[in-house]
Image (spheres, grey):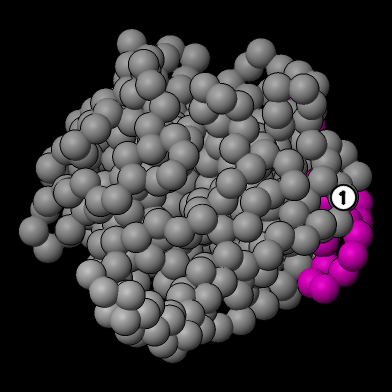
């Protein structure tokens, strides 16, 4: 090839690069976002709950701090720079559920207190800033899932009881303050996911069974019929995974633990066709991470653990393109944390733990402005 021809080709490549580079820069930067230091909790904790209240304040309850279950609660008013002390729970607990009811009340159910699996339930009232008892669960449980249904009732599924992993289900009526037994699931499970679908039904996926082995089984609850229907199983066994309802009505499942390995694989469930398909895997295997749907339709994955430790790398899933991109990294990798989408579109990650310590710090993720 002549020198003249090589020079011509280099000129063409240079022109293409000049015109394309702004677009390439846009794609790379658009996905990153930025993490900032957030307000430090008064009490370090993990396996706690964090609930965004109607007034845009954030309420954190319970958790574990150095093998001590906490009753302490904290409140972060919207746009505040520090946590405030909030009335304590009546029962210290971790691994409980927290469900926002109408009127700014939060239902706290189950969990573990000391060596006991709890049936005690409490309600935090935002208006009066008080905590009071409500009816106990029919069966104490931890590592269960609680889902707010369209009629305002709360569905609690599975979990671990004093007798082992259960398939039992209960519904709480906020009007009467009473729990009643609901139809039992086909499969016992704990550390599963429960996703409210657009039609008001609930998809329950995976978890571990009474032998503590992760499984693939899925079923859907119909609140109007009080019945369960077995649907297609996931393609991989997993517990400790996440499940996110995407804007297109499909459900994205990420990571988790098979009982033998921590996964980077992800699946997507098509409700209309009752079909699971593998989608692009995450860059990092994770168990005990969080997944948050952002206003722009992307899913932010934060934290968790794997055989290498606690990944600082966070990731974004773009469902329209079935593509993962690396986001900005956390200052501190963590598991057992909470991640909450705030009214301004940022995500606040609160507490958690590493091998070395329980965390009191929080970090705020601000998506790119584009």
Location of residue 89 by image quarter: top right
Q: Does residue 92 appear in the picture of this structure?
A: no
Q: Which quarter of the rendered picture does the N terminus lie within?
A: bottom left
Image coordinates for residue 8, horizontal then vertical, percent: 32, 84
User: In the drawing, does residue 345 fall left or right of residue 237?
Assistant: right
Image coordinates for residue 130, horizontal then vertical, percent: 81, 55
Image coordinates for residue 325, horizontal then vertical, percent: 45, 59
* Relative vertical location of residue 95 with respect to residue 295 in this rendering, above or below: above
Residue under the image location 66 percent in, 37 percent down: 334
The answer to if 110 sits in the magenta stretch is no
Residue under the image location 87 percent in, 50 percent down: 40
Location of residue 365 by image quarter: bottom right
The answer to if 69 sits in the magenta stretch is yes
* Relative vertical location of residue 112 with respect to residue 346 in this rendering, above or below: above
Residue under the image location 66 percent in, 13 percent down: 115
Q: Which quarter of the rendered picture does the C terminus lie within?
A: bottom right
Residue wearing tag 1: 40
Magenta segment, which residues?
68-86
The residue sitting at the left extreme is 273
User: In the drawing, does residue 31 fall left or right of residue 278?
Assistant: right
Residue under the image location 36 percent in, 16 percent down: 260
* Relative vertical location of residue 116 with respect to residue 198 in this rendering, above or below: above
Secondary element at tag 1: loop
Q: Does residue 356 appear in the picture of this structure?
A: yes
């Amino acid at each position: 090839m002549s020198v003249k021809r090589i020079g011509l080709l280099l000129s063409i490549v240079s022109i293409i690069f000049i015109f394309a580079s702004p677009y390439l820069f846009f794609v790379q930067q658009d996905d990153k976002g930025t993490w900032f230091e957030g307000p430090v909790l008064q009490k370090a904790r993990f396996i706690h709950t964090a609930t965004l209240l109607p007034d845009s304040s954030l309420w954190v309850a319970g958790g574990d701090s150095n093998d001590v279950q906490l009753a302490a609660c904290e409140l972060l008013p919207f746009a505040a720079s520090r946590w405030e002390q909030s009335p304590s729970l009546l029962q210290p607990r971790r691994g409980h559920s927290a469900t926002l009811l109408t009127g700014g009340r939060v239902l706290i159910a189950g969990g573990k207190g000391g060596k006991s699996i709890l049936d005690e339930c409490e309600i935090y009232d935002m208006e009066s800033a008080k905590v009071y008892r409500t009816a106990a669960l029919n069966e104490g449980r931890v590592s269960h899932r609680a889902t707010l249904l369209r009629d305002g009732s709360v569905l609690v599924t599975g979990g671990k009881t004093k007798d082992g992993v259960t398939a039992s289900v209960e519904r709480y009526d906020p009007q009467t303050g009473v729990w009643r037994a609901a139809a039992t699931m086909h499969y016992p499970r704990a550390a599963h996911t429960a996703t409210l679908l657009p039609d008001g039904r609930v998809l329950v996926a995976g978890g571990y069974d009474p032998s503590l082995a992760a499984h693939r089984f899925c079923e859907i609850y119909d609140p109007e019929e009080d019945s369960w229907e077995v649907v297609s199983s996931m393609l991989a066994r997993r517990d400790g995974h996440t499940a996110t309802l995407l804007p297109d009505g499909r459900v994205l499942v990420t990571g988790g633990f098979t009982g033998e390995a921590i996964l980077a694989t992800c699946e997507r469930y098509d409700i209309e066709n009752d079909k699971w398909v593998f989608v692009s895997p995450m860059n990092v295997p994770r168990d005990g991470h969080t997944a948050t749907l952002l206003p722009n339709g992307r899913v932010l994955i934060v934290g968790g653990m794997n055989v290498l430790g606690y990944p600082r790398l966070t990731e974004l899933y773009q469902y329209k393109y079935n593509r993962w991109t690396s986001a900005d990294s956390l200052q501190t990798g963590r598991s057992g944390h909470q991640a909450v989408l705030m009214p301004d579109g940022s995500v606040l990650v609160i507490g958690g733990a590493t091998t070395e310590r329980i965390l009191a710090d929080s970090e705020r993720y601000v998506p790119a402005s584009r």
